[in-house]
Image: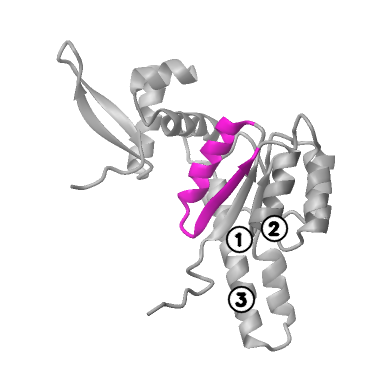
Amino acid sequence: MNQHISDEETPIRVLIIEDDLRIAEVNRRFVEKVGGFEVVGIAADRGEAVDQLELLQPELVLLDVYFPDMNGLEFLSFIKEQHPDSDVIMLTAAKEVDAVVDAIRYGVFDFITKPLIISRLQQTLRSYQEFRKKIRTLKKEGAAINQQEIDQLIHGSGMKSSKESKPVKGIDRITLEKITTYLMQTEEATTDQVSKETGISRSTARRYLEYLVAMGEASADLSYGVVGRPERVYRRGTKEKG
């Protein structure tokens, strides 16, 4: 007997439009760490983006601004005209005032600058989930929408900050993001490796790695090298229990 799957149980389909495939893959992992989202495609240029938008009909698009063959803001306008049911979050290194203003005018759900802060992206994705949930509830109720509900839709999601995005004392977000991204790419690393790859001191690397462990974003195990000296090896995510 087939079970009916509600809208809330169906993952939100996401298309990533990013010309750097390495960054796109990292972003895919970040998105799929948030429950309720599924990356259904990655497009590296305008042709791929146009085709995948047409074929996949994603609910959400993560879009960069800079591409060799197109302007991301112009493509945002194209999405809004040709695929009005697809919402857009811009993930970009562009920080010019005009770029941000244009994105808002075109109706972007949020604008997040690189280097990407994972917690900031996850905050936005959760806000987007709440936004869609609120719309579903309002449609089910069928009554005319009131001012309070309008305010919640407009101001209650996207383009807002929260306590989650405030920096932790003694922890620099950009440095933390470098280490987190490195762990995501390498799967496991020692303090020395992190220090070398990120250009920070060994003691600083250890402090950030232990912070990630304390926050449940990484796990650590003892590993015995060829000389028998134990060292801590860090891995992205929590340690699975057998």
Q: CA distance from mark 1 to mark 3?
A: 12 Å
The quarter of the picture where residue 19 lies is top right
Which residue position is annotated with label 1? Answer: 128
Q: Dot 1 surroundings within 10 Å: few (below 14), some, or many (20 or more)?
A: many
Residue underneath mark 2? 87
Mark 3 vs mark 2: which is more N-terminal? Answer: 2
Tell me where residue 61 appears, x and y as whole percent.
66, 51
Q: Residue furthest left?
A: 228
State which quadrant residue 98 falls in: top right
Residue 216: x %, y % from top left: 35, 45
**In this view, the mark in front (1 or 3):** 3
Residue 177: x percent and y percent? 51, 34
The mark that comes first in sequence, 2 or 1, is: 2
Relative depth, front residue between 112 and 9:
9
Q: Which residues are magenta?
A: 20-43
Q: CA distance from mark 3 to mark 2?
A: 15 Å
> The residue under label 3 is which amino acid type?
Arg
Query: Which one is in front, 204 or 15?
Result: 15
Classify mark 2: helix, strand or loop.
strand
- Left of 201 or right of it: where is 57? right
64 on left or right of 99: left
**Residue at screen point 49% across, 17% down:** 199
Q: Are marks 2 and 1 in contact (CB under 8 Å)?
A: yes
Q: Which residue, given by chain and number where applicable, does mark 3 sit on?
A: 136
Residue 25 among those drawn in magenta? yes
Say which amino acid is labelled 1: Tyr
Compared to residue 36, the image places residue 238 above or below, namely above
Mark 2 or 1, which is nearer the eye?
Answer: 2
